[in-house]
Amino acid sequence: MIYADHNATAPMRPEAREAMLSALDLGATNPSSVHTKGRAARGVVETARMQVGGAIGSRAADVIFTGGGTESDALAVQGVVDALDGRCTLIVSAIEHEAIAKSAAHSGAPVQTAYVTAAGIVDLEDLRTRMANWDSEAHGTPVLCLMLANNETGIIQPVAEAAAIVRDAGGLTICDAVQALGKIPVNVGLLGVDYLSVSAHKIGGPQGVGALWHRAGAPLKAILYGGGQERSLRSGTENVAGIAGFGAAVEAAVRDLPKYAALAKYRDAMEARLKAEGDVVVIGEDSPRLAGTSNFARAGFRAETQVMALDLAGICVSAGSACSSGKVKRSLVLMAMGASDALAESAIRTSFGWNSEPADFDGVANAWLEAARRTVLKEKV
Ligand code: PLP
């Protein structure tokens, strides 16, 4: 089997598994307990906090563990809206993951869209003009939601530039870095954002664990109330083993950044073959992209047909984002980039990661071309 769906979830790294097993072996442990076992669990959580903080260039103290990327996004969006008593406007990029887009829609705050260009990159000129004319009396604090790397296309956003524009207008920036962590360097200071969300399972950690970093002093209110864990910003007994796995995974992912970057060579070779022999269009080809992501389309060859054909050949890929791939629908991300219906309906995402081999890229190209020859490229056989 070839697993080319790392952006949906990555296989667990051995380091994460080991860290989780040793945390589980601590037995009954609640990090809030003051006895010996509780203190051992606290140690595990705080070590992981340092590992996550270290990976994103932040103080450990500013990292809040959550139940995953979706919860981190929800905490950032709702937490800032509530902290500002709703006196803000969310400016949500047109390519955000639903965890951000739907949290914004349900937040009670007004929402504007930050448009992207045909290259899949947020339109900085438009943002600059909007911020230059921002009426805080009427619209409150502008809060930009801009992801660092897109889950479907892998296109990397100019977050530092966008955050600077918004900051100069007295605004704040929430950055969903779920797909960027462990794939490109992520540094909260260099990005100049105020909130940044990450998730363990996209980098070889366990599912159901994530973190939200927030700049010290940035407005943020809890969305869960209870025992006051995580400095009262995320109540609930910590998932000790999951957090341990996250810490170990993030350390390994940062160590492996050069290995991940090297995937671009094989990705490009795969795309070159698909373009030459399969008439595909590579989405965002000329934009900065994650090295292991390739989203390509062949008009007339429906995405679900491609996904099924590859599945039969023992290859796991997605149509669009994983969340929408169960019920294949046209990609909103590609629509936002101005792609035609025909293209948006025929785009699939292949995503490679920490345990991908050069042969995996050839395997995907061979199987895809074989399926295309049977289905849409008959004339070429
Ligand atoms: N944000 C992005 C960009 C994602 O790709 C995902 C997962 O698909 C999420 C948020 C949600 O993360 P999680 O699955 O940990 O809830």
Image (cartoon, grey):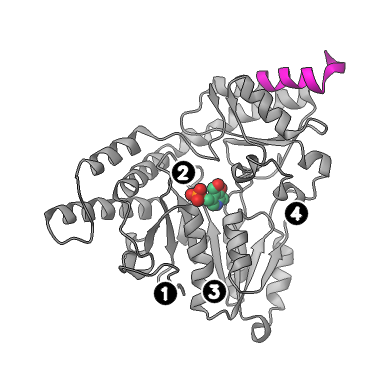
Closer to the observer: label 1 or label 3? 3
Query: Badge 2 is on which residue?
Result: 182
Q: Amino acid at mark 4?
A: Thr
Given residues 98 and 284, the one toward you in this image is 98
**Disc 1 and disc 3: Cα gap in Å?**
15 Å
Any part of residue 236 in sight = yes
Q: Amino acid at mark 1?
A: Gly
Question: Is residue 43 in the magenta section?
Answer: no
Q: Which residue is pictured at 38% across the width and 68% down the height?
A: 233
Q: Are marks 2 and 3 in contact (CB under 8 Å)?
A: no
Q: Amino acid at mark 3?
A: Val
Residue 242 horizontal side relative to residue 368, left or right: left
Query: Badge 3 is on which residue?
Result: 81
First along the sequence among labels 2 and 4:
4
Is 205 placed above or below 60 here? above
Residue 28 horizontal side relative to residue 348, left or right: left
Query: Badge 1 is on which residue?
Result: 217
Q: Please, which residue is most extreme toward the left here?
A: 36
First along the sequence among labels 1 and 4:
4
**Disc 2 and disc 4: Cα gap in Å?**
26 Å
Given residues 64 and 115, the one toward you in this image is 64
Question: Is residue 369 in the magenta section?
Answer: yes
